Structure formats: structure tokens, C-alpha cells
Image (cartoon, grey):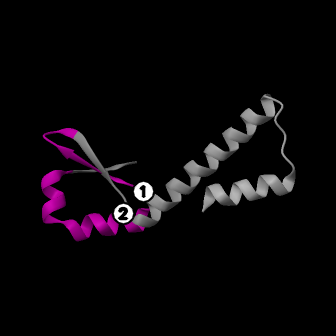
Amino acid sequence: MPTIKPSVYLCDNYNDISNLCHSRMEPVFITKDGHGDLAVMSIEAYEKFCGRYELHYLLEEGLEDEKCGKHNGFDEFMTKFWEDVT
């Protein structure tokens, strides 16, 4: 279940929001005037999210290459993989 807090709460309770983000490893949603405005998360959760997104992108790219008949050798794949990851 997502955690939702008003923007006023963010200003007055920064440490509580920070603790929630770190302990749950998920974003806290901040509202402004009753509408969604921000998603706040720890840097660790953000980096994990970005890593998953990058992996998903690379897998999709590989599947598309497979459909098009593009095949690379293992060494070439690993070289490109590490270039894209770093």
C-alpha cells in the first residue's frame, strides 16, 4: 500500500519521510492541493529501480535483435553489455 502525505507534512516532518523511504525501500507520494505532485524515495531505492529499468531495456533490445535475426557472439555481447552498464 503506498504511503501518501501532503506537502505540508514534508516540510514539517522531513526526517519521518526519510525514515519511511529508507525502511520501506519504496517511494512516498506527496500531494499538493489534494492532487499527486511528487514521489520521494531513497537513493538506494532509486538506484535499484534504475538498474532494473536498464536490465529490462537490455533484455528487450536482445529479444528484438533475436526477432530480426541479429546474433552476436558471446564475447561481443559481453563487451557491449558492460559498456552499456557502466
Q: Quadrant of residue 34?
A: top left
Chain-order first, disc 2 or disc 1: 2
Q: Is residue 25 found left or right of 36 in the rendered image?
A: right
What amino acid is found at the position of numbered circle 2 in the picture?
Answer: Cys
Q: Sort mark 1 into few (<14), some (14-19) or many (20+) by Cα contacts within 10 Å.
A: some
Q: Is residue 9 found left or right of 78 in the rendered image?
A: left
* Residue that label 2 marks: 21
Part of the protein shown in magenta: 6-35
8 vs 12: above or below: above
Which of 69/9 is in front? 69
Q: Are marks 2 and 1 in contact (CB under 8 Å)?
A: yes
Residue at 24% x, 43% y: name it.
37
Mark 1 falls on what kind of element? Answer: loop
Q: Position of residue 52 (x, y in %)?
A: 58, 52
Q: Is residue 65 found left or right of 42 in the rendered image?
A: right
Q: How many labels, in total?
A: 2
The extreme right residue here reads 73
Quadrant the C terminus occupies = bottom right
In whole angstroms, how far apart are the C-alphas of marks 2 and 1? 6 Å
Q: Which mark is residue 26?
A: 1
Residue at 46% x, 66% y: name it.
44
32 vs 18: above or below: above
What amino acid is found at the position of numbered circle 1 in the picture?
Answer: Glu
Q: Is residue 79 found left or right of 5 in the rendered image?
A: right
Q: Position of residue 78 (x, y in %)?
A: 77, 57
Q: Position of residue 36 (x, y in %)?
A: 25, 40
Q: Position of residue 54 (x, y in %)?
A: 58, 50
Answer whether residue 77 is magenta in the image: no
69 vs 14: above or below: above
Q: Sort mark 2 into few (<14), some (14-19) or many (20+) by Cα contacts within 10 Å.
A: many
